[in-house]
Image (tube, rainbow, N blue to C red):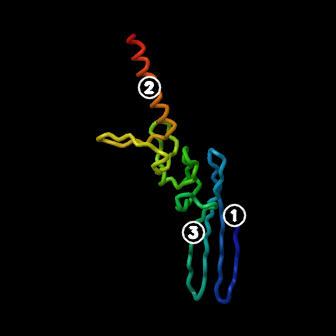
Amino acid sequence: MSGVYNNNVGNEVRKITRQSEKYVSPSGQAVEVLWIEEIRFANGQIEKLRYFENQPPLADGRVAKSADDIRECCVCFKQLHRDSVNPCSNCGKSVCKNNKCRTVEASEESEATICLGCYEELNMNCIKRALKGIWSLE
């Protein structure tokens, strides 16, 4: 959606351009990214303003400038700015930096974010391997 609006107020001439882009998450939630450009001409000077809005606002309070900047946490399903999420090291899904939504496997060299789904799956595989080892001893 885009629109151009001209408005003359006294000696000021304004041109407002509105455009929007829609992000639809894997869970079906939609966020509209609006960017508004306003050009004002008053008293012989040109002033250009550009600002962005998200409707509804993102859960982390940040403002995305493009639909590509929006991610959905695969655990809590909140819509967040891409700088507020990490990819799961195992499956690549976005996981918010909220401690309830992620587990961190740390070593001396690096740190890996793992979503709760992968964490549970990895733990189950470890348990299965341990049980197979125990059963094979009998």
Amino acid type assigned to the residue bearing label 1 in the image: Ser
Residue shown at 46% from the left, 47% from the top = 86
Which of the labelled discs sits on residue 127, or is there none?
Answer: 2
Which of the labelled discs sits on residue 65, or is there none?
Answer: none
Which image quarter is the N terminus in?
A: bottom right
For this view, does 4 lie left or right of residue 48? right
Residue denoted by label 1:
2
Q: Secondary structure at mark 3?
A: strand
Residue denoted by label 3:
51
* Position above or below: 63 against 115: below
Whether tag 1 and tag 2 are in contact, CB under 8 A, the answer is no
Residue shown at 47% from the left, 44% from the top = 87
Could you say which is closer to the camera, residue 92 or residue 95?
95
Indicate the quadrant where residue 63 lies. Answer: bottom right
Q: Estimate the x, y position of residue 138 in percent, counting from the top left.
A: 40, 10
Which mark sits nearer the N-terminus, 1 or 2?
Answer: 1
Residue shown at 54% from the left, 47% from the top = 73
Amino acid type assigned to the residue bearing label 3 in the image: Tyr
Could you say which is closer to the camera, residue 53 or residue 36?
53
Q: Estimate the x, y position of residue 36 in percent, counting from the top left.
A: 62, 68
Which mark sits nearer the N-terminus, 3 or 2?
Answer: 3
Name the residue furthest left. 108
